[in-house]
Amino acid sequence: MLKRAMKIGATVIMCAAALLYTGAVFAHGAEALEDDSCMRRVGENMIHLSVYQPQNDMAGHYCTDIPAVGETVLVVDLVEPMLREMPVGLKLIRGSSEDGDVIADILSNIYEDGVINTQQALEEGRHLLVVTAEGVQPLKYVYHLRVDMVNYAEVFRATIGPVVGLLLTVLIGYKLFRSKRFKDWLAARR
């Protein structure tokens, strides 16, 4: 019985460790280019968004979840060389639809270096960044930004592993302490 409980305990600990370890996969820097949540693709054309708030964190690099209100640097990288040869424009909108208030409207221009950047003061709430490329076939990329908002999905993902591990440890401990063999072993030690 004790060997069985130890095997079950070891299995549970390994599963809990695996759950805790897989949480690291959600980090931004460990992703392949195609899996990067900051990457947008329309057909074969890709762009990448990087968001910075140097006044809050000099090394901080964000995408769609921006941690604080205030001055924010938005950098769009035109990954595909073809995009660098056509006019590309940006529109930053307050709200979650294109009908909201336009905060910034960067007119279409050709960016030979492949980088479009702007600095804007963002308020708390949802924003929309729309990037349009005026090619033979017009392209439209959309980023839904959340500024200074709690992302409950990330909070859930970060806490579910430790909570499940704790509950399983408590359950195994309870079963072990309630077992007759453990009580007999304890009585023999006294």
Image (spheres, rainbow, N blue to C red):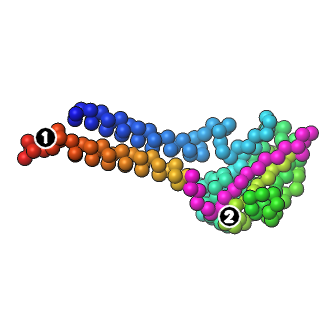
Q: Secondary structure at mark 1?
A: helix
Is residue 8 in the magenta section? no
* Left or right of residue 54: residue 101: right
Q: Nearer the viewer, residue 167 or 140?
A: 167
Picture disc at residue 95 = none
Q: Residue at x 32, y 48 (%)?
A: 170
| Disc 2 residue crowd, few under 14, some 14–19, many 20+, Cα 10 Å | some
Stretch in magenta: 134-153
Q: Does residue 57 appear anywhere in the picture?
A: no
Circles 1 and 2 in contact, beta carbons < 8 Å:
no
Residue 157 place in picture, x, y as percent: 52, 49
Q: Which mark is residue 185?
A: 1
Count of numbered tags? 2
Q: Is residue 70 left or right of residue 45?
A: left
> Which quadrant, please, contains the N terminus?
top left
Residue 187 appears anywhere in the view: yes
Instruction: Name the residue type under label 1.
Output: Trp
Q: Is residue 48 left or right of residue 190?
A: right
Instruction: Give me the residue at 36% from left, 38% from top.
Output: 12
Say if the magenta span includes residue 139. Answer: yes
Which label is found at residue 125? 2
Element on which disc 2 rests: strand
Q: Residue furthest right?
A: 136
* Front in this rendered view, residue 89 or 21: 21
Image position, residue 188 (x, y; %): 8, 42
Amino acid under disc 2: Gly
Q: Quadrant of residue 4?
A: top left
